[in-house]
Image (tube, rainbow, N blue to C red):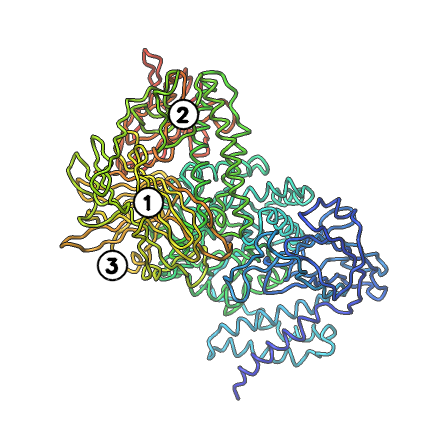
Amino acid sequence: MHDNQDLTLARVARVLDERLRPATHSHPRPLTLAAHRVGGEPIPVADGLAAEYLPAHTGDVWGRAWDTTWFRVTGTVPPAFAGRRVEVLLDLGFDTNMTGFQIEGLVYRPDGSPVRSLHPRAQWIPVVKEAAGGEPIEFYVEAASNPVLLDYVPFQPTESGEWATAGEEFLYRLRRADVTIFETEVFELVHDVEVLLQLAQQLDAGSARRAKILFALDRALDAVDLQDVAGTAAAGRAQLTEVLASPAAPSSHLITAVGHAHIDSAWLWPLRETVRKVARTTSSMVTLLDEYDDFIYAMSSAQQYAWIKEHRPEVYARVKQAVADGRFVPVGGMWVEADAVLPGGEAMIRQFLYGQRFFRDEFGIECRGAWLPDSFGYSGALPQLLVGAGFEWFLTQKISWNERNVFPHSSFEWEGIDGSRIFTHFPSMDTYNSQLSGDEVARADRNFKEKSVGSSSLAPTGWGDGGGGTTREMIARAKRLADLEGSAKVVWEHPDAFFERAKAELPEPAVWRGELYLERHRATYTTQHKMKQGNRRNEQLLGEAELWASVAAVRAGREYPYEVLDAAWREVLLLQFHDILPGTSIAWVHREAAERHARVSAILEGVIADSLSALGVELVAPASPVEPVETAKLDRPIVLVNAAPVAQSEVGAAAIGRPASADKGSAAASGAGFVLGSDTLRVEVDAAGHVVSAVDLASGRDAIVAGERGNLLQLHQDFPNLWDAWDVDNSYRKMRRDLDAADEVRLDGDAVVVRRSFGKSSIEQRLSLSADGRALLIDNTVDWQETEKFLKLAFPIDVFADTAVAETQFGFHSRTTHDNTSWENARFETHVQRWFLVREPGFGVAFANDSSYGFDVVRSRRGGTVVSDVRFSMLRAPRFPDPRADLGVQRMRFALAFGADEARATELGWAINTPARPARGSEVAPLATSSDPRVLISAVKLADDRSGDLIVRLYESSGGRATTQVSVDLPVSAVRAADLLERPGELVEYVSTTEGLVCVDLSLRPFQVQTLRITR
Ligand SMILES: [Zn+2]
């Protein structure tokens, strides 16, 4: 036989796109259009329906960026359509390549009930399944004219990311508003042909299966009259019955399709638009669930359900019913899909607590798995936190984005820093937006790493990022792929069912130890500094507010502000979303987030002041680690309010007490430079404001490499290949400018003040010693006016360190300072919580921050030995998606401790972030203390269930085994261990002392997080 396979492939592709698909809707008749332009923020549905409408026509332009236009579509079903399935086709100017990134609409009936969403890949509205003819048609469409920001030439700076700068021109043109017949048989033919064509494209050119499929496709097209597709579709399909009926091989890969729309809670659109995106997508998804019995849809993020509940109750009622039916599946158990390395440990716990609480209260269920397909790396603390919150599995696919190294497993056990393990799956299709194309289905099979023992992978299926969700076309593909020779099999299935099978297939899964570092998006530890600062400040303030509100409730009978704290937590948790905290959204999102962070801070400061006043304590100044209040100037006894779990100025953890007399040290001119000195530390600053010596007096060691300069600002060119706000590429290191010159270096009280200018930017630094004289503080105020630059603050440290130790949530991990392997080489910029440390046996230097998360450490060889070049990452200036990211005044503080180990670094990290606050009033003893200083009490609060129980959370901070005695200073009737969701577990034995303390002995494994629930 002659081989005509290539000709057949080309023939089928063209006929499918140009003749078969367009024939799905036939006999179009124009409808009448009218429009109401809102000209501002979205209006309630009732107002949209009742608005004044003006005539509109196809060909009209409409929609400035971010505006809403309500369209009314009216007409009558033609009598000739009797007996046929009728749909409206409405093309508002859609671009089929931009689903979720441009126009979207939600369709309503005249009574305000939602019908479904409109988007570029779903331009139809159902009218009637079997028309009588003559039925009236009346629909209303709330259409959002969202601008395309990630265009065909991606990552171009745009002014369209804010209402005010987006411009007034209309972006879209109405193309079509017709009533049509939906040709069911043509729809089925289209999917028969499409699935077989895409399968043939994946099969080996020499395979018999491919030849048979192409032969059948050729015959099918011979049977279809292209001038009467609807009339001949059945004849075409008849030629394909046999090849479609041939079953898959017994060893075929099995793909669990889960209907999904990964809707980013904010990104290239503001939060308010996400509220509508979620309502649009879910209204379509519940309609699909009604239509297709085997379809399953999963949605994450309690916040998104809460938005529908508040803003679109009519959609929510249908979602609630579908959840009760087990078809609409809440997944993830988190408040939002948060970033998974930047939030603090307690905040990660609250993501689970608030997420699971919502699902329990609203639907009576808890999610069994955590679902974070798109976050930018996953900390090694997560396995313990997931298991401790009751999760049985974890899903992500993001590590497939690695620039260099291919992750070796698809399904495996992930082991955290404390040794906890959780079963984890990476969908081998490498996407969270599957369309079930032939290419994707083949990739899932090919990429699956455990194929020698298992055969199951999961595919989140639907238009995502900007929403849209699953389509009837995807469902049609899945139906044909259920059991098809040559293809992996596809089944709609609940993710829990998938994980049960995947676990059963792998009785001895491989283990991956430690963090899941993403080899990409390394700049998200730094970009949009105000996101980082607001998050860190509010995490700390929430801890302080809960602590003092608990003390006030227990000691002074003050009512605990549950509602205020819940609202503040939910706000902070929302702003940890994986495009907000990382700094990768449009200007609108970041402006609004900074405002929201500031409001939360003000509310929490109010809670703290109010709780303290119930205890007879009055704050005299805002907390600041660098501006201590002069005690002599105060007329009443001064106390320090210490919310940290470490002593500060000899005031114990979580206590209010009299500080020891401060040894703040002094600053003095010395030769051409300056000296900052105390009993324990001597720091020399040269005339240009650089730190040229830092001697730990106890050991006599100078931490700065001889003859070199610390506190050196370094400015790099920073223009990544892709993803400006997200990525910094290793090549940035090659172009560097050291900011040597100072405009001014002078003494100011106990501080040395350094001012420098570069380009249009300037920086002022205050260098001083901490109140106890043991740490060097650097308070930076930068007026940042750069373009595509990366600012680092460098210290050449005379320490031979193979690893840098960095704090993560509830503990720390080590990273090599060399790059022997490609995995180590890829980690040229890494993340930290509050501190990192370089050390050799007997001597180390700790670096703490109050609001920044990026750093790098490079080994260098100088003077015959290896030293450590250590740098804080300060600021970047990417131009996409926010063309003015980070411009303006930014402030951040750093602290350095010399002669430090992990314990000292931990203490420093707490102190710079939760500094003791000066106050007037009486001393207050802590509610709970831990006898072993390695075991820190990181949270004290009243229980989430409002029973009045006290929750005390502790963690082992050193990475070793610890035994501690926890003493609780209140009348107690029971002490229980609890999980991270505060669910009471076993009773814990305690003894009461004659002083009225209740004492509990605890043994903790390395980095263990332990929650105690204490009934008063
Ligand atoms: Zn995302």
Could you say which disc has been placed on residue 820 in the image? 3
Tell me which residue sits at (46%, 59%) in the image: 723
Q: Which residue is mark 2?
A: 976
Residue 779, quarter of the rendered image = top left
Q: Which residue is mark 1?
A: 744
Q: CA distance from mark 3 to mark 2?
A: 48 Å
Label 3: which secondary element: loop
**Where 449 sits versus 1001, above or below?**
below
Of callouts 1 and 3, the N-terminal one: 1
Kind of residue indicated by mark 2? Arg
Of callouts 1 and 2, the N-terminal one: 1
Label 2: which secondary element: strand
Kind of residue indicated by mark 1? Glu
Label 1: which secondary element: strand
**Where 532 sits versus 6, above or below?**
above
Which is more foreground, mark 1 or mark 3?
Answer: 1
Whole-percent x and y of residue 658? 33, 19
Q: Residues within 10 Å of mark 3 (few under 14, many from 20)?
A: few
Q: Residues within 10 Å of mark 1 (few under 14, many from 20)?
A: some
Residue 239, quarter of the rendered image = bottom right
